[in-house]
Amino acid sequence: MSDTTAEAGRRPRPALAHHFDDLAQQKDAATLGMWVFLATEVLFFGGLFAAYSVYRGWYPEAFGAASHSLDITLGAVNTAVLITSSLTMALAVHAAETGERRLLVLFLVATMALGAVFLGIKAVEYAAKFAEHHVPGPSFHFEEEALSRNAQIFFSLYFVMTGLHALHMVIGLGIMTWMLVWAWNGTITKEYASPIEISGLYWHFVDIVWIFLFPLLYLIGRHA
Amino acid sequence: MSHIVPKSVYYLIFAALMAGTAVTVAMAFVDLGAFNAVVALTIAVVKATLVVLFFMHVRYSSRLTWAVVFGSVFWLGILLALTFSDYLTRSWRTFG
């Protein structure tokens, strides 16, 4: 490795940065750094889940009724879409690690396409909520007048939580576009696959947030 | 150096996640009283654990990464436990 260092130094993106001993250490450091960031994300969304749980505990009827107005089919389809995008992301990491560049590009594009489908379905759901006057604010209207005030709390949490999740998806699509360029121009190699790996960590984390949002927002209280 | 996870593992986890989604939707239509929330959250925790261990490779990661992942869940536990110890016990205040 040391005999190619001089040449590697002139390349725009040498696989091994000079402050690491070897590629394994570099990869461990990148993974660890990403997980430290994800720990802050866990607590960021955790606060919202705590707020949701407290209000749900206080106003179970209003939350049940408001939850009923969400489209369970679209929610379930979106869950499947996101899980499938996590599979294509995992396969993209596999393709990067085995140095299969065409497969990597293919799986990154598939991941982005599925992410776009998720956001499209979310947009359809949001449009329906606007049409039903279920968006908190002056024109808010809920079918059961007595529950209106507390249903508005449910929809506030619904829009903040799914909105922040969707924002994370949009950022994820940006990261994937960046990775697509790096996969395309050959920056990503078998030796230097960690950018794909840690972008994948971010993508899977956003999937996990949805794994909790779906039952909490769409399913609990459905039977009632 | 790095452990490459075989594709078959990814397909297996994907199938488990899809099955979990189907079960959680089906269970939502069965009236279990307070246990509906317990069932839904248990399935969600299992799904999240599968994603973390296999899709996110934590099963094959360094001990230090393990510590950070465990730490994030532990701190989330502190956040939720202290929040609920306040809000969920307010109605108990019946002294005097």
Image (cartoon, coloured by chain):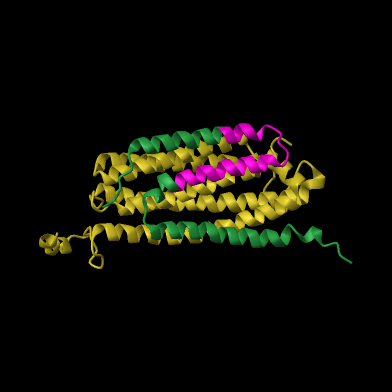
Chain colours: A yellow, B green
Report the residue that reaches farthest toward the left: A3
Q: Main secondary structure of the magenta part?
A: helix
How many numbered marks have been drawn onto this rendered protein structure?
Answer: 0
Q: Which residue is drawn at 45% across and 33% down?
A: B15
Quadrant that contains the C terminus of chain A: top right
x, y (%) of residue B46? 53, 43
x, y (%) of residue B18? 50, 34
Q: Is residue A192 left or right of residue A139?
A: left
- From where the camera sits, is residue A126 visible? no
Residue B93 sits in quarter:
bottom right
Instruction: Write down the region rendered in magenta.
Output: B23-52
- From where the camera sits, is residue A164 visible? yes
Residue A32 sits in quarter:
bottom left
Quadrant that contains the N terminus of chain A: bottom left
x, y (%) of residue A109? 35, 41
x, y (%) of residue A149? 77, 51
State the residue in front, A38 or B43: B43
Report the residue that reaches farthest toward the front: B63
Q: Is residue A123 left or right of residue A3?
A: right
In the rendered structure, does residue B92 fall within the stretch colored magenta?
A: no
Q: In this view, does B43 lie to the left or right of B3?
A: right
Q: Which residue is drawn at 56% across and 43% down?
A: B44
Work out whether A14 lies above or below B2: below
Residue A107 sits in quarter:
top left
Report the residue that reaches farthest toward the right: B96
Q: Residue at x 75, y 47 (%)?
A: A60
In the rendered structure, does residue B27 fall within the stretch colored magenta?
A: yes
State the residue in front, A135 or B52: B52
